[in-house]
Image (cartoon, helix red, strand yellow):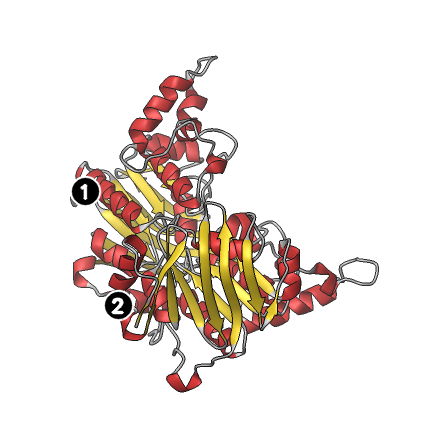
Amino acid sequence: MTDDVILKISNLSKSFGPVRALKGVDFELRQGEIHALAGENGAGKSTLMNVIDGILQPDSGEILFDGVPVRIASPAMAQKLGVGFVHQETALCPDVSVAENIFMATTNASRSLLMNYRTLEQKAAEVLGELVDINPATLVRDLSISHQQLVEIAKALTLDCRVLILDEPTAALTEKEAQILFRIMRRLADKGISIIYISHRMVEIFDNCDRVSVFRDGQYITTRNVSEITPDDVVNAMVGRVIDELYPRKQTEAERSDEIILNVRNLNERSRFRDVSFQLRKGEILGLAGLIGAGRSEIVKGICQLEGEVSGEVALNGKTLSLSSYQDSIAEGIVYLSEDRKGDGIFLDMPIAGNVSALKPEQVANGFGLILRQKEESQAEALGARLNLKYGSLTDPVSSLSGGNQQKVAIAKMLSVNPKLIFLDEPTRGVDVGAKAEIHRILRNLAASGVGILVISSELPELIGVCDRVLVVREGRISGEVTGDRMTEENIMHLASVGGAQAAIQ
């Protein structure tokens, strides 16, 4: 990192109607530094990055590139200035190949009438070689979320970037993939490329970044060297208050129940998972850990009949179920919150109220199947208050909300059917620390009220902090269970990567 300033933003403001997203913001990026941007969802981070990338135009303020005032009128102009942006939500074209996605900008600029697919795929393989083993000819729609994110990163690396913006780039990555990304980031910084790194994960900021700037409520708060500040200092600056408990109190020994909500026996689905058996007890939060691709999501999707041809026995509150579709699952009180919030969790362009009622719209309809808007909004208002949802109007599209509030809408949709059991897949992905604490509290309250809660998460501290027990999945089988003092990252990773003797580590 040098003292040379490549990007300087002064007194920048941006409003959306009556909402002031940025209020006289200042920001400075030096050449060759990895600069973290921290703040709760809705703090203004993404708005500022969209201004830098030319997606949005500021209402006022000044942007200097190499000391020269610029007006970044479009993403194309930002790219000419050397700005590359990897968004938190992937924006790839699903129906074309990985190679075509990676070199889309180059292809669009080309005057050639024909495309040489072989050359394109060879170039893509060279770029991907640093990140992951993916066939460049594969259609993007056939990739996992984590591999789609890596394609987004590879796409940015092909641009001649001077400033690279990474918005929650590890949210969908495995630990191994994340470490590869961090090494590439440092290598790019050593070459003089400046990186703006947005993350809610303090360990990533403090392990990999040079400086951190904190935003709160659309305002710039502070910039500090990471060597001169603690994670608690950053969190407190983000929220404007001290967060004492990220995770609520777990069950005590006296509170534990022998009553079984969910009993799964000998669950199988061809090559995805086999011989899966476990129980979920009343009042507990059960965690499901494992490396990406181990079969965690596939198991719960199989139980819900969302995908695959599943055999085995599933009993809910002592009743053996015969499910043939997800609608059957909902009717029995079992719901699934997808890890892909944008793709499967919510309808971004629909109103908040319409999203909340989407699982079972007949609840807010008249006898002729017509939605009663007042009843729909009353349902959304009640569930929104229960989850501390922050919004302008229930008729606003969900896309107008912060990531944390979008996730609360997805949870409200699950609660709208009065579920007996909720599977939550990566429930706090891309959510800030304040919203995480709220969601953890919501899950604990639901468990205490008698709703069965099973959480899948790639964040081991979250599983350890919020769950009473954690089952570990490896290669489609449950390789072990951890509880109590033995619920450590080391034990979970051992069972996830090496396996165990199908016995609990207690």
Picture coordinates of residue 387 (x, y %)?
53, 70
* Residue 316 to residue 11: above or below: below
Q: How many labels does the image show?
A: 2
Residue type, mark 1 in image: Asp
Amino acid at pointer 2: Asp
Farthest residue, direction bottom: 254
| Residue with the mark numbered 2 | 233
Q: Quadrant of residue 75?
A: top left
Labels 2 and 1: the sequence-earlier one? 1
Q: Residue at x 18, y 42 (%)?
A: 4
Label 2: how many residues lie within 10 Å, few (<14), some (14-19) or many (20+)?
few
365 relative position to 453: left or right: right
Q: Position of residue 424 (x, y in %)?
A: 49, 61
Q: Which of 339 and 187 is in front in this view?
A: 339
Coordinates of residue 469 in the picture (x, y in percent)? 38, 70
Task: Identify which residue is drawn at 35% across, 37% down.
Answer: 84
Q: Please tell me which residue lies in front, 98 or 154.
A: 98
Dot 2 lies on which element?
helix
The residue where tag 1 is placed is 4
Q: Residue 229 carries which label?
A: none
Q: Residue at x 22, y 38 (%)?
A: 188
Q: Give 458 or 18, whichever is nearer the viewer.
A: 458
Report whether 326 appears left or right of 142.
right
In what quadrant of the picture does the N terminus appear?
Answer: top left
Vertically, is 9 above or below 215?
A: above
| Separation (CA) of disc 2 from disc 1 | 27 Å
Residue with the most extreme right position? 368
Query: Quick check: can you spot residue 458?
Result: yes
Q: Label 1's element?
A: loop
